[in-house]
Each structure stands twice: as structure tokens, then as C-alpha cells.
Amino acid sequence: MWQQPAPSPFAAASPREFGSGGAAATLGSSASWAGAVGSQARPAPQFGSFGAPVSSGMSPAGGTTWNGGSQWSSGACAPRPGELPGEGENGCGGSPAIGCGGSGSDANWRPLGFGAGASSSSSAVSPWVLGVPEGPERPRMRRHPPFTWQPATDFLGEFRVSGDAREVVTKVGDFWEPGTVVPAAGTLQMSKGGLYHWTLLLERLPPQRPQIQFGLHGVGHSRPMRVLSSTRCSRARDDDPWEPRPAGDRALAEGDYVHVQVDLRGLHLPFGTLSVAVNAEPPEIVFDDIPLGSGGAAVSTTPVIAMGGDSARVRLCPAY
């Protein structure tokens, strides 16, 4: 006669005792595993996804059973007295939830929660059985530059634009006219009411022609033009002559980060402002006379970078 087994002292569920969808097959309960008594074998229920019983039996002849609810009585991978399930030979402990690879009938155990036709090999154990849920990759915040570089048609051969977001612009060859730089504009269009930020990394300054100019131009490289020079931090408006930096000359070097802010809100002035900060230094206002438009005529500007020396390279950093 089949006898109801006594409760197991290891009845607490562990990650190894979980099937697909988190359905627990708790050892030692009436719904767990039972072995053969005499010539009668009581089939053990299997659990499919979300703990729903499935029809096909999984209990092999001569399977693992409990004696007196305190120890294992058979099974090639059964734990020894005093061992927890999972601490037996071969590291599998005879737990039917992990499909131990023992000899004889024990080699036919397969993990709980697997559908029909699932592999009985221990290498096919689902991460759910081991307590590691499967799922989509966690979303990650990916920062992108605020715009991309787009040289004008007349200067396409002067630059090489690269990077996943077209954020790196490199000068190709020295410009034919000494002391002259050619511009490459950004795709961002700035207009009245906006506050704009971007950061430039000066990756390479060629020693023969190190000057790089940055600032803003009107759309199509028209007026207004406000640019700053990297060699002295002098500045120029439109076609006016260069003006020195009020606090003295300052040369930028390779590896410097240049943070640019263009404020076209017109909160306290009838004009917009352009401020620049180098690395972690405080910002300084370079221009405070950027026109915002009048009489209903809107003024649109774009970021600009201008270079003349071969292999000069500037990277537009991701926005924060």
C-alpha cells in the first residue's frame, strides 16, 4: 500500500526547485516526487509553465523517494545524510528539478516546467530553473550629440565627417591659401527664444596650422557671423577686424573641452549672447550682440567650426 510521505525538513523552496514561470515543485509535499513501493509505482505530477500540471508522466522506475520523510532512499545522485539537496555527488544532489546526469534511470530526469520534447541533458537547463530569469535587455540611456556636421557643398572635399552620429570632423589636407580657414556648419538651426549648448573636444591641432575657429554663422554661412580663435581666443564679428581677448591672450591645446552656450531668449538684452568655458573653468561672455530679428524677420544661425591645417580634428561631444 502506498503511504503518504512525511513532510520534508528541506521543504523551503530554493532556486533549484522552481520550474518555468516560477512554479515551485517543493520536495516532500504530496504534489512532489514519489517512488516505487514494492511493485507499484505512483506517477509523479509534472508542472508546465506557470505551474499548470501536464499530462505526460516523468517519474522513472526506481526513482528517488523519501524514507520516513527524513532522508533519500535511492538515486545515483541522492545526497548523503546531513547534506542538503544539491550537495550530493557530481554536484547535482539528485534533485529532479535540475536534471542530474547520473547513471541508470536517474539520467532520464529532465527539468520541471519544460514542455514535451525538451532535452534531458543538464546543459539544456533553463535559466529559470537556476533562478536567473530570461528577458529583454535592460534599456540603457544612450547619449547623442545635439547635432551633426554637414559641410557646405563647396567644401565637401575639404573635410571628412565620421563617427556613428557624424560627430567628428577632420580637415583633409592643408587649404591651398595660407592663413585661411574653411567652415563646416552643424545641422542645428538656432532662433529667437532658444537656449543652446554644445561641447567641442579639440582632438588634434596640426603644428603647422593650429588655428581653429568656432562660433556661429547665419544659415548658408551668411551674416551674422560670430567666431572665436583657438590660438589667442581673439574674436571677430562679420567682416570686422579681430579683437583681442579682454583678459589677455589664451591659447587652447589638444585635449581641451570647449563648452559653448548660445542664449537667444533676450531676457535682459535686446540681443543674444554667446558664452564659452574651457574645461572646468567658469564661462565668459564672448559676444553680447547676436541679432534676434526685428520687424517679424526671423534670424536663424547654426554652429560652425573652421579649420585650415591638414588632419585638424574636432569631436562634438554627446549632450548631457
Image (cartoon, grey):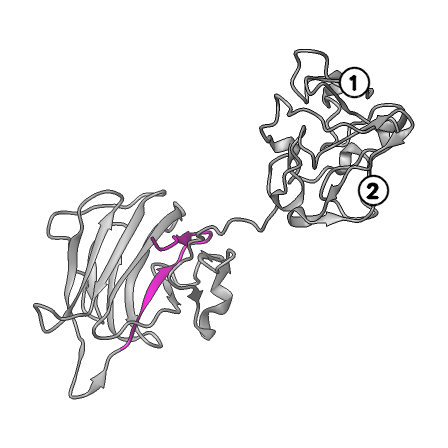
Label 1 crowd bin: few (<14), some (14–19), many (20+), radius 10 Å: some
* Nearer to me, 251 or 280: 280
Res 36 seen here:
yes
Asked if 275 appears above or below 106 in the picture, the reply is: below
| Farthest-out residue, left | 268
| Boundaries of the magenta span | 300-320
Q: Secondary structure at mark 2?
A: loop
The answer to whether residue 279 is magenta is no
Which residue type carries mark 2?
A: Gly
Disc sitting over residue 185 in the figure? none
Left or right, 114 with respect to 279, comes to right
Q: In which quadrant of the rendered image does the N terminus lie?
A: top right
Disc sitting over residue 57 in the figure? 2
Q: Specify which label sits upstream in the sequence, 2 or 1.
A: 2
Disc sitting over residue 73 in the figure? 1
Query: At 18% from the left edge and 65% from the top edge, which residue is drawn?
Result: 241
Instruction: Mark 2 and mark 1 in contact? Answer it, CB < 8 Å.
Output: no
Measuring from the top left, give residue 253's x and y in whole percent.
32, 43
Measuring from the top left, give residue 105's x and y in whole percent.
88, 28
Left or right, 245 with respect to 4, comes to left
Which residue type carries mark 1?
A: Ser
Measuring from the top left, give residue 46's x and y in whole percent.
75, 42
* Nearer to me, 196 or 209: 196
Q: Secondary structure at mark 1?
A: loop
| Quarter of the figure with residue 226 | bottom left
| Farthest-out residue, right | 39
Label 2 crowd bin: few (<14), some (14–19), many (20+), radius 10 Å: few
Asked if 237 appears above or below 169 in the picture, the reply is: below
- Structural distance between the alpha carbons of marks 2 and 1: 21 Å
